[in-house]
Amino acid sequence: MSKTLQAIRGMNDILPAQTPIWRYLEGTFAELLASYGYSEIRLPIVEYTELFARGIGEGTDVVDKEMYTFLDRNEESLTLRPEGTAGCVRAVLEHGLTGGGQVQKLWYTGPMFRYEKPQKGRYRQFHQIGVEVFNQPGPDVDAELIVLTARLWKRLGMAEAVTLQLNSLGSSEDRARYREALVAYLQQRFDQLDEDSQRRLTTNPLRILDSKNAQTQALLADAPTLADYLDDESRAHFEGLKARLDAVGIAYQINPKLVRGLDYYGRTVFEWVTDKLGAQGTVCAGGRYDGLVGQFGGKPTPGVGFAMGVERLVLLLETLGLVPEALDPAPHAYLCAFGEPAERAALALAERLRDQLPWLRVLVNAGGGSFKSQFKKADKSGARFALILGDNELAARTVGCKPLRDDSEQQNIAWDALPECLATCLEQG
Ligand code: HAM
């Protein structure tokens, strides 16, 4: 017997029982972003590998260990996008969307791919909803991004379950000076570092700050802190952000060890974290990347954004019991037909109903069946009404209309009167 085919580890099917929650989340987000003046952009899933190597940075876990990279038939190295920012920057540059200092406020959603060790909340194909803003250098827009995510948590009912962590990574010069000091400090304690941190000391020393190793964390307690290396401008930028968050009443924790896993960040970085999902508790993360457009060969253009993990938010909605009821509403009517002439007429009748009542959810029985079996299916579908079409009704151009959710009597209704009748009954119910 041939082996049963299975999905790739860490790449999940999203089954019909789940899709309404996804649509709810995506719909809520899209509506919210429209209210803040953001527009949607749709981007390719595959890009040249170089885009990510240059954008996210060699030496990051994402680029060094986690990319799905392959040669196409033309021997070009391509990569399934591990995140959305690099592709979005490429697109705005390629289409001249940020030329002349034009402000762009964009959002996107879709699958991302990282070869990580799968566990609850961490997958190899996962989905992000992301936002990127270009040509807005001030802390006002950083604050707006955080404010709008806070509003999303409120709309979803999960504001109590997430907390905001904030840090400033300063300018690239600030980080270079800090990196030197940190490396000097850790070099003297090299033997006490975990293996991963020893490697990072040469590849990406700032990432040592968010090491999960307890001994490394203990060593870091007395290490120099980035906050002491910020120049006046970065400090003012960070103060400006904090003052705005204070003004709108958004609580935050300053986390001096928040450095993020992608190299393009400078100044503001933030993460929304929950303790309800176990180890993979970051549901939304982002920050400022004023150097990235320049790095791709464009005119220096400030950028800032974030992305949230859709799987993690769906898990959180489910864990907290916040999935609204009736996300996938039952049909209004289930049309039963007996005999082939009636079946043909049923198909046409349902189409007429849909012409006149586009909002109506009507299921037409398929596959024939006895009165009893069709009625059972009508009941199981959750429909409010069973519509019955047999030879007699066909001859009289009527349908039997039987309420399924209360004890009211069945009525016979002329086809022409049916749309209005249904509309009235459903409105009243
Ligand atoms: P990131 O922190 O790599 O940032 O990912 C953002 C969010 O995507 C995470 O906080 C998490 O919720 C979700 N996520 C990441 N990896 C996985 C995974 N393997 N499985 C499930 N969910 C995951 C970025 O990607 C940046 N592009 C965000 C950004 C946009 N910064 C500025 N603009």
Image (tube, rainbow, N blue to C red):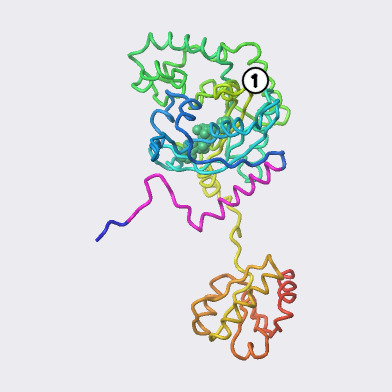
Q: Quadrant where the N terminus lies?
A: bottom left
Question: Residue most toward the left?
Answer: 1
Magenta region: 5-34
Which residue is depicted at the point 62% across and 22% down? 299
**Can you identify the residue that label 1 sits on?**
238
Some atom of ligand 1 lies within 8 Å of the CB belonging to the residue at label 1 = no
Observer able to see residue 38: yes
**Magenta includes 218?**
no
Examine the rendered structure and indicate whether residue 41 appears above or below residue 290. Answer: below
**381 or 337: nearer the eye?**
337
**Magenta includes 10?**
yes
Q: Is residue 319 left or right of residue 5?
A: right
What amino acid type is highlighted by mark number 1?
Phe
Residue 411: where, in percent of width, then height?
Answer: 68, 84
Examine the rendered structure and indicate whether residue 411 appears above or below residue 356. Answer: below
Residue 362: where, in percent of width, then height?
Answer: 62, 71
Helix, strand or loop at label 1? It is: helix
**Residue 331, located in which quarter of the rendered image?**
bottom right
Examine the rendered structure and indicate whether residue 152 appears above or below residue 374. Answer: above
Which residue is depicted at the point 57% across and 11% down? 228
Which residue is depicted at the point 45% across and 22% down? 207
Which residue is depicted at the point 65% across and 11% down? 232
Q: Residues within 10 Å of mark 1 (few under 14, many from 20)?
A: many
**372 or 303: nearer the eye?**
303
Q: Is residue 311 left or right of residue 404?
A: left
Observer able to see residue 116: no
Residue 222: where, in percent of width, then height?
Answer: 47, 12
